[in-house]
Image (cartoon, rainbow, N blue to C red):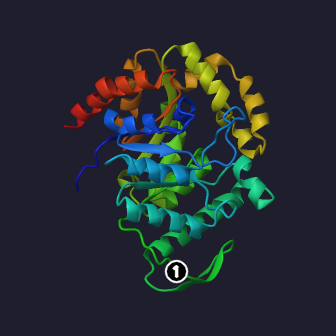
Amino acid sequence: MAVKKFEIGIDASFTLLFDEEYSLRYLVRMEKAGFDALWLGDHFYPWHHSFRHNFYVWSLLPIVLSRTKSIKGGVAVTVPIGGRYHPALIAQASATIDVMFPGRFLLGVGSGEAMNEQPFLGFWPKWEERIERLIEGIDLIKKLFHEQDFFKFEGKYFKMPMAFLYLKPKTDIPIYFSAMGEKSAYMAGKYADRLMTVANIERYSSTILPNFEKGAREAGRNPAIVEKAVSIGGGIGDPKNVVKRIKTYIAGASLKEMFNEPDPRKILEAAKKIDDEQIMRSMCISETGADIIENIDKFRKLGVNQVIWGDFSDNVNRMLRIFKTKIIPYFKEESE
């Protein structure tokens, strides 16, 4: 069996803060810098009230793919649990993009956050219900991708007496299952085509990976052959500036209780109380980029197939230049 090459992706969601006209100039340069995949978040409300020009990924991503040649584009992550999205709509949207850009679309799914789903559901289900909805939604999406005739879907949460997707994907679309904790990592092991998580090396090795492997083995799967993507947040530049950006736009996502908070204004206020040193310890912040190579390499050695750089650098051009000239070439040389 061929060994899957190691890839470096980038979550470019917050890069758009430097491009309020949405010219997408930085996103296009990410392909030229050598990134293998470009990921964008899917939010109705942003994590923080300060991120006021929150975009709609399903409009933006196809345009990015049309202006690039080979880089893959991913949604990280969408939530097909019946709030904003019925799973059938995610199947239709995904198939459409794959027909337009075969093999370049990546689909990440998760169980969601209150700030995005509660306004549409009208309530906020407990985690157990959300994960049931997600697993059922994935099942429906896959059936719509592959069934060649009308079928009846009778789930606990989703019911379609006649379901059929006329426009099928041109290529196989593996579904990345977002897992942030012990229980979700275990469920990902049982059901995921591919694992996606956000973690530092300690949390990944001690919590995410062991629970994922347990779930996979209990489902009769070999966890070693399931592809894994890990997102690491950080930035290149003056550490004070990078920490300030993280606090302003995303730090609330590190607080577990904020997944149940529907108001981005309150999430922003909670994030302001996080200590700068805590951010420095949990994120990958570098003035030169040298220690980012070391950090990424730890994940590669644990069998991770893609590390996704969640960027909060204070200068996008400098960050792209360092990845292009130092970080990405290092891993390409290692894989040759």
> Toward the viewer: 109 or 85?
85
Residue farthest to the left?
336
Dot 1 amino acid type = Phe
> Which residue sits at x=80%, y=57%?
123
Residue 173, placed above or below residue 167: above
Q: Residue at x 48, y 62 (%)?
A: 94
> Residue 49 in the image: x percent, y percent?
73, 35
Q: Nearer the viewer, residue 263 or 280?
A: 263
Q: How many marks?
A: 1
Residue at disc 1, secondary structure:
loop
Quarter of the figure with the N terminus: bottom left
Asked if 140 appears above or below 259 in the picture, the reply is below
Report whether 110 appears left or right of 38: right
Q: Where in the figure is residue 302, as x and y percent of width and height? A: 38, 38
The vertical placement of 14 against 217, above or below, is: above
Considering the image in quadrants, where does the C terminus appear?
top left
Give x and y (percent) for residue 191. 51, 61
